[in-house]
């Protein structure tokens, strides 16, 4: 663990959407040192930074070169530039896979799921997160903020999924669903959309996570981090614990296990890919 580098304060430690998802994703995956973990769409490497704090070095892949360069400065990890529909890794390479807010952006979501299964080892655990279409604010103009510019990485190819539709997609790809969660219910989603509205008013151009790094140096962010985030976090968590089993939320989280035949042993399964 001593040779792992990580940021004591990561820029996304105060991201409501990231933190709410991480509660369920990390609790399910529980990666251990020595296991191969891949974060598809790693952005600034929030999950890899959390794992490095616990002694786990992971692999991070993203479509954005800018985000990868910044992630590499923040924490240890093996980083690669790539497309979720054609992952730059060999078959059966990973024990744990994280894929958060990616498949709604790709043209072929089924191809992306096939790739996740291909690079996963038999029995690998997978946590997938994507927007739900039944959240309280899912049909409002706020939902489209920063996701409506065609040709950019954050453009939504589809608005999201229903829980049953997403589970069917995963099962068809060879992922046995073991559980599902919904997070960012009423207050949580309202706080999230208000944050996006504030950034849009400040003319922040958000197309990759790297675009938000400059905001973390402002006085408004410091105020948010110290005073507002703890309140929003506490209220959102309480709401999720009380209503999460019965109400729809902004984010769908599906947890599953990859089912496929074991591949022949190889000396090295993971490709080292440069930025």
Image (cartoon, rainbow, N blue to C red):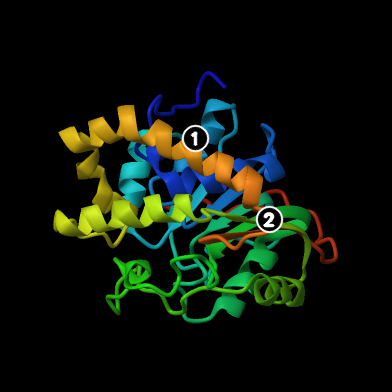
Disc 2 packing (10 Å; few <14; some 14–19; many ≥20) = many
Label located before the other in sequence (2 or 1): 2
At mark 2, the secondary structure is: strand
Q: What residue lies at 55% left-to-right and 40% top-to-bottom?
A: 237
The reply to whether residue 78 is in sight is no
In the depicted view, which residue is nearer to us: 234 or 26?
234
Q: Name the side, left or right, on which 228 lies relative to 54.
A: left
Q: Name the side, left or right, on which 184 lies relative to 29.
A: left
Q: Which label was assigned to residue 112?
A: none
In the depicted view, which residue is nearer to us: 169 or 66?
169
Instruction: Report the residue marked by disc 1.
Output: 234
In the depicted view, which residue is nearer to us: 182 or 30?
182
The image position of residue 12, as x and y in percent, is 39, 41
Instruction: Report the residue marked by disc 2.
Output: 126
Tell me the quarter of the picture where residue 46 sits.
top left
Query: Closer to the camera: disc 2 or disc 1?
Result: 1
Residue most extreme to the top: 2
In the depicted view, which residue is nearer to us: 132 or 40?
132
Above or below 98: residue 170: below
Q: CA distance from mark 2 to mark 1?
A: 27 Å
The image position of residue 146, as x and y in percent, is 29, 66
The image position of residue 20, as x and y in percent, is 53, 45
At mark 1, the secondary structure is: helix
Disc 1 packing (10 Å; few <14; some 14–19; many ≥20) = few
Above or below 233: residue 167: below
Q: What residue lies at 80% left-to-right and 62% top-to-bottom?
A: 263
Q: What residue lies at 31% left-to-right and 43% top-to-bottom?
A: 70
């Amino acid at each position: 663990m001593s040779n792992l580098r990580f940021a004591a304060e990561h820029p996304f430690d105060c991201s409501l959407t990231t933190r709410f998802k991480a509660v369920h994703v990390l609790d399910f995956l529980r990666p251990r040192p020595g296991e191969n973990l891949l974060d598809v769409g790693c952005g600034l490497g929030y999950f890899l930074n959390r794992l490095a704090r616990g002694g786990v070095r992971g692999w991070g892949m993203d479509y954005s070169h800018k985000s990868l360069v910044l992630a590499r400065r923040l924490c240890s990890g093996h980083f690669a530039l790539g497309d979720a529909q054609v992952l730059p890794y060999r078959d059966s390479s990973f024990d744990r896979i994280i894929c958060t807010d990616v498949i709604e952006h790709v043209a072929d979501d089924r191809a992306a799921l096939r790739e996740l299964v291909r690079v996963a080892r038999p029995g690998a655990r997978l946590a997938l997160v994507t927007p739900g279409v039944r959240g309280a604010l899912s049909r409002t103009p706020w939902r489209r903020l920063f996701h409506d510019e065609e040709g950019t990485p954050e453009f939504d190819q589809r608005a999201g999924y229903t829980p049953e539709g997403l589970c069917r997609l995963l099962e068809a790809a060879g992922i046995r669903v073991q559980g599902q969660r919904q997070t960012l219910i009423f207050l949580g989603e309202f706080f999230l959309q208000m944050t996006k509205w504030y950034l849009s008013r400040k003319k922040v151009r958000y197309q990759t996570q790297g675009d938000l790094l400059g905001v973390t140096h402002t006085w408004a962010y410091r105020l948010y981090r110290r005073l507002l985030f703890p309140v929003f976090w506490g209220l959102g968590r309480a709401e999720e614990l009380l209503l999460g089993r019965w109400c729809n939320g902004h984010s769908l989280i599906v947890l599953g296990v990859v089912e496929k035949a074991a591949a022949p042993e190889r000396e090295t399964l993971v490709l080292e890919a440069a930025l």
